[in-house]
Image: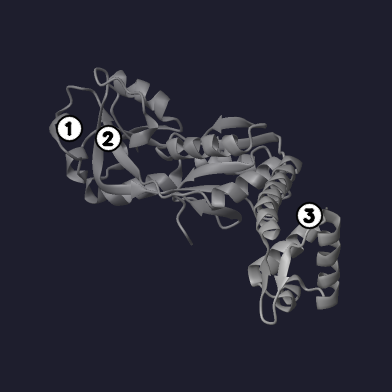
Amino acid sequence: METRVLRYFLAVAREENITKAAEQLHITQPTLSRQLAQLEEELGVHLFERGTRRTTLTSEGLLLRRRAEEIIELMDKTERELAEQEELVDGTVSIGWGELESVKFVASMLHAFSEKYPLVRYRLYSANADHLKSQIDRGLLDVGLLLEPADISKYEFVRLGVKERWAAVVLPDDPLVVLESVRPDDLRGRRLIIPFRQNVQSELFNWLGGAYDEKNVVCVSNMSTNAAIMVRAGFGCMLTIEGSLPYTDPSELAIRPLDGLESTSVLAWKREQPFSPAVTKFIEFVKCFPGIEKR
C-alpha cells in the first residue's frame, strides 16, 4: 500500500466526490477510480458506498481513514525531520562588538540561534565601531555590532530596538551622584574622559552645546573599561554608554544618565559578500529575530 494511494483515498473521503477529488489531486477521474479499486482489491474490503451524488465511507472505510490520517501525518513529520537533518549546519560565526547595552540583546540572539543550530561555534571580538568596520572589510569578521552614528552605507544591516543611553561615570562622592540625570551645564568646567571615535565625539559636543570646552577634554579612550580605571584614579568624569560597564562596583564608581542623550546600534555585514552556510543562516535568523526594527 503506497502512501500516494492513501492520499488519494483521503481526498475522496474528504470531498465525498471522486471527480472533485481528482481535480484537487490533478489526475484524471478514471485514474483515481482505478487506484481506489486496486486499493479495495488489495485490502479485500469495500471502502466506499457509491451514490449518485455522494461517495461515502463504509465502516471499513472509516477505519482506514483514521489509520491513513495517522500514517500520512507520521510520514510528513518524518520527511520534515529528515529535511532538517540534511540542513545540519556547523562552522564558525565571527562577531565583533563594542561595550554596549545591546551586547546583552545579541547574546540572547546567539543563544536562540545556538538552540536551532547547536553545531555552530562563535568567535567574539571586542573593539569600537571604526575598528570593527575595518575588520569586516578585511574579511576578518563576519558581522559587527556598531554604535551609531557610523557610516554603514556599504553594509547590509539591521537596527536593534535597544536604546543606548549615555551616562557620566564618576567617583561615589562626586556631586553629580545626587542628580537624577546629568545636564550639560552640570559638566561645565569638568575634566572629561570621552570616547576615541570622532563622530561619537561630535554627538557629545553637540549635546554639551555651550558647556563644551575643548581644553576640558583631558583624555580619550577606545575602551570604557580602561577609561573607568582613570576615573577611579581621580582623573576626571567619563562620558560613555551606560551599558558599557555592566559589572561596576557602586563602592568604586557611580553612573548617572545624561539627560536626553541616546544612541542606537546596528548589526552590519559586508554587502554582496559570499558567506559560509553558518554565517548565512545566522544572517537570515537575525533579520527575523524579535526586537529588530523594521525598515
Residue 151 visible in the snapshot: no
Circle 2 residue? 168
Secondary structure of the residue carrying numbered label 1: helix
How far apart are the alpha carbons under marks 1 and 2? Answer: 8 Å
The amino acid at mark 2 is Ala
Q: Quadrant of residue 4?
A: bottom right
Secondary structure of the residue carrying numbered label 3: helix
User: Residue farthest to the bottom?
Assistant: 52
Q: Nearer the viewer, residue 117 or 206?
A: 117
Specify few, some or many for label 3: CA neighbours under 10 Å numbering under 14, 14-19, or 20 or more: few
Circle 3 residue? 3
Comes first in the chain, label 3 or label 2: 3
State which mark lies toward you, 3 or 2: 3
Q: How is the image coloured?
A: one colour
The amino acid at mark 3 is Thr
Comes first in the chain, label 1 or label 2: 2
Q: Nearer the viewer, residue 190 or 43?
A: 43
- Left/right placement of residue 55 relative to residue 115 reads right
Circle 1 residue? 176
Tell me residue 288's x, y (percent).
Answer: 53, 52
Callout 1 touching callout 2 (CB < 8 Å)? yes
Q: Nearer the viewer, residue 112 or 223?
A: 112
Q: Nearer the viewer, residue 105 or 148?
A: 105
Tell me residue 193's x, y (percent).
Answer: 34, 32
